[in-house]
Image: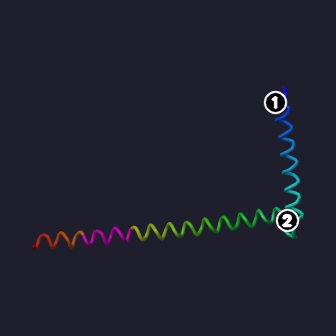
Amino acid sequence: MFGIEAMIADVGTTHDLLAKTVGEIEANGDVTLASRVDALTKSKREVEDRLARIFDSFNALDGLRKDIGGIFSTIRNSLNGIG
């Protein structure tokens, strides 16, 4: 039983520390914790949008690379047919 009681005490201590930390975060500055979370959520969406645009650009570049590779392959085959 002592092990379970120790774990419960640890959970209680962790809870108290978390509550204290959240309270300190909430008390610091003029911005509430909810506003900070909203700002972080907005920033996360902006980063995700930027990453999506970057991946779209890489996909477009990959398509161009494949097209150019096909052109060079056609040229090489044509030159091999001539010579």
Question: Looking at numbered disc 2 in the image, what kind of residue is underneath it?
Answer: Thr
What residue does disc 2 label? 32
Q: Is residue 36 magenta?
A: no
Tell which of 4 and 48 is nearer to you. 4
* Quarter of the view holding residue 68: bottom left
Residue corresponding to mark 1? 3
Relative to the observer, which residue lies in front, 61 or 2? 2
> What is the span of residues highlighted in magenta in the rendered image?
63-72
Task: Find residue 34 and report its horizontal and vertical position in percent.
Answer: 81, 62
Residue at position x 82%, y 62% in the image: 33
**Apparent side of residue 65 relative to residue 30 in the rendered image (left or right):** left
- Position of residue 7 measured from the top left corner of the image (x, y, whole percent): 82, 35
Residue 54 position in % (x across, y down): 52, 69
| Total numbered circles | 2
Q: Which residue is outermost to the top?
A: 1
Circle nearer the viewer, 2 or 1: 1
Label 1 CA crowd tier, 10 Å (few <14, some 14–19, many 20+): few
Which residue is pictured at 86% across the width and 38% down the height? 9
Q: Position of residue 65 (x, y in %)?
A: 36, 70
Q: With respect to residue 37, does 72 lie above or below?
A: below
Secondary structure category for the residue under label 1: helix
